Image: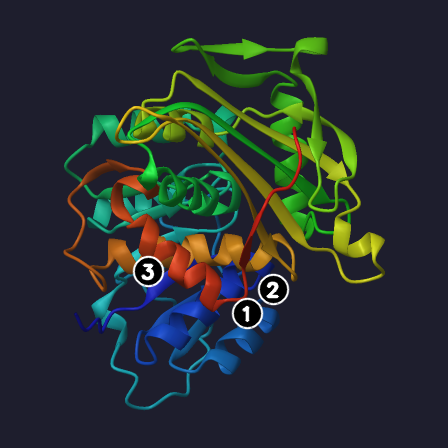
Amino acid sequence: MEHSKPVLIMGGSGQAGAEAAALLRRWYPKLPLTIAGRDLGRARRVADELGVATAVTIDLRRSDLGLPDSGLPDSDLLDSGFPGSGFPAEHGYSAVVATVWDSHLNGLRYAQDRGLPYLSLSSGLTDIAPEVVAGGQRANAAPILLASHWYAGVIVLATLDLAREFGRVDTVRVSGVLDELDIGGPAATADMERLTTATSAGLVRRDGVFGWVSGPEAQTEVTGVDGTVMSGQIMPTLDVPSLAVATGAPNVSFEFAVGESASRRRGEPASAEVRIDLEGADRTGAPLGTSRYLLHPAGQNPLTALGVALGVERLLGLRGEPVAPGLHTPEALIDPAYAVERMVEIGATFADARGDR
C-alpha cells in the first residue's frame, strides 16, 4: 500500500526514533516521514539524512501539538526542499508515533481526533492506565498500539517464536542484562528514572495469578551469556501479561540486571543480551524445555527501533491489512517468525544457553 501522507515521529531525532525512521526508510524508500524534536536543527539533520522527510518542532503540552489543523507544520517550522515527495501540507499525517513519553497524552488525542494510528513506546506498565482509558473511551476513533514493552515488544515476539514448538507452555522466564552504558539518551534515562520511581515492585504470574512482588521477593540472579551471575530484579513490564496471555503459561516472570554486559567484559562495546527460558510439553505431551539467548552487538537501541518500525509497518497496512480501531499489543499484530527474520537482518543472533539457571 502506498502512503502519500507522512508518519509523524515524535522524538524522531532521538536514538530510537531516528533508528526506527532509518529502518522504515530502508524498507520503504518512498514513505514520507516527519521528524519531530525539541531541537529543530537536529531534527533537520536526521530528516536530511533520510530523504523524503521533513523536520518540525512540536509542543507536547498543547492538544494540537502546536501544529496547524492540516497536521503539517507552518512554513517557518518546516524543513522544506524535496520536490516530488508527494505530501503537500493539506494531506496531514498517516500515523503518530510517540518514541518519547507522551506526558500530556496530547499525541494520542491528536491521533484520535484525526482517526490516525498511534504507537506508544515509553509509558511502561506503571503509566499505561491513562492510555488504556483513553483508548477504551474512544474505541472506534483510531488503532492504538501499546508497545511500551522491553525493546518495544521484540522480546515478546522472539519468545512466542520459540514457543511454537510447544504444545503447552508452563513457565516463561525472561532475564537479561541492561548494560549501564547502554541505557540511552536523556529521554530514555528520564523514562527509566520515572518508571523505577513509580514502583520498585515487580509483576509476575504464579500458578495462574498475576501479583506484585517486592523487597527480597523481587530480588533474583541473572546469568549472562558468558556465565557471569549478576544481581537482578523482577521487573514491572508489559511483557509479563503479554506473554502470559499469549502462551497461557501459568508462571511468567521478567528479570533484568543493570551492569556490565559480556561484550564489554571482553573489551568490546556494550551489547544487548536477553535469556529466554521456556518449560512445558511438546505436542505429544512429553516434557520440553528450551533456553536461548537473544543478542545484539550494538546494544538495545537497534532492537527497540525494530520494534517501533514493525509496529508502524503493520499500523499503516504496509504489511497485512490496515489495523482496526481499538487497543492492540505487538504480539496481536506482528507475526513472530517474521519479526525474528527482521531481528537477524539487523544483526541480532540467537544462541543456546549452556548450563543450569
**Nearer-the-camera pick, 311 or 344:** 344
* Residue that carries the numbered disc 3 in the rendered image: 68
Q: Residue at horizontal 41%, vertical 87%?
A: 81
- Discs 2, 3 touching: Cβ within 8 Å: no
288 vs 91: above or below: above
Q: What element carries label 2?
A: loop
Amino acid bearing label 3:
Pro
Q: How many marks?
A: 3
Q: Which of marks 3 and 1 is in front?
A: 1
Spot occupied by residue 79 in the image (x, y as percentages of width and height): 46, 78
Q: Is mark 3 on a helix, strand or loop?
A: loop
198 sits left or right of 182 in the view: left
**Label 3 to label 1: alpha-carbon separation:** 19 Å
Q: Mark 3, residues whose alpha carbon is within 10 Å: few (<14), some, or many (≥20)?
A: few
* Residue that carries the numbered disc 1 in the rendered image: 43
Q: Residue at horizontal 37%, vertical 45%?
A: 161
